[in-house]
Image: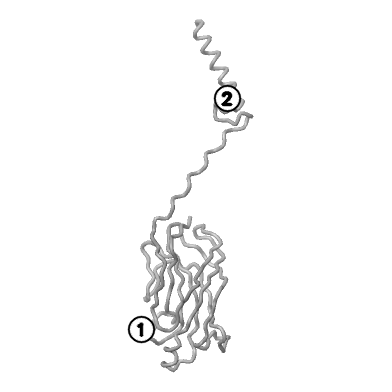
Amino acid sequence: MNTLEHARARRLMALVAVCLLGTTACGGGGDGTPAPAPAPAPAPAPTMSCASGWVYAQIYTDLRTPVRYWISDTAAQASVDVEVQAQIRANNQYYSTSGRQMTGRLRLSLWAIPANGQISKHGVVGHLIARTPARLTGGTDPGEDRMIHSSVAFAKLPATGTNPAAGDYCIALSLDEETATGTPPCLTQDKFCLTSWYTFDGAVRFQ
């Protein structure tokens, strides 16, 4: 080995010794600790378009502002705590002319609607996150949850539920009333049909 080769070997051994000490030149912290892992790249924002808005499918009962929801976690398929908030109004003119003195049982349903799903008066193609009974204030017969039509309720209701599979979803809150009559009649198996719903602005990513 000639003089030049000896010099190169000495420099290489010195560099290895420095790197073993964990200097910043070799990716360490200078104090013997390994270099920190790079920060993960932020998750891309949802690309779905979810415009807020109301739809009134029936003439019986409907949702009114304020309408809000809260989910404890956005992990896919996680069990979550949910809170929904809405004002519910009964259509007094309809009930007075139809001879009905009470609404049917009411419930609020929180939905995650995928890009290939939909919510309409015919039903929902999506994932049911949570559901909770809702009542009008000042009514009678609470055991059956059937309330006088002239009442208005402000509901802020807790519930538990399950998130959908990973993906981007629009979130919607529906008001469902139990009734076997109407135009069109409610033909679902449990006799609960959507009377109105609200779609929230902005998609939510579950992951």
Helix, strand or loop at label 2? It is helix
Coloration of the structure image: one colour
Residue pictured at 49% horizontal, 67% vertical? 129
Q: Does any portion of residue 17 appear in the rendered image?
A: yes
Mark 2 vs mark 1: which is more N-terminal? Answer: 2
Q: Quadrant of residue 58?
A: bottom left
Residue pictured at 55% horizontal, 13% vertical? 10
- Amino acid under disc 2: Cys
> In the image, 197: left or right of 137?
left
**In the drawing, what numbered circle is on residue 184?**
1
Image coordinates of residue 135 in percent, x first then y, are 54, 81
Helix, strand or loop at label 1? It is loop
What crowding class fits label 1: few (fewer than 14 Cα within 10 Å), some (14-19), or many (20 or more)? few
* Nearest the eye: 116 or 154: 154
Residue under circle 2? 19
**In the drawing, what numbered circle is on residue 52?**
none
* Nearest the eye: 194 or 156: 156
Image coordinates of residue 14 in percent, x first then y, are 57, 17
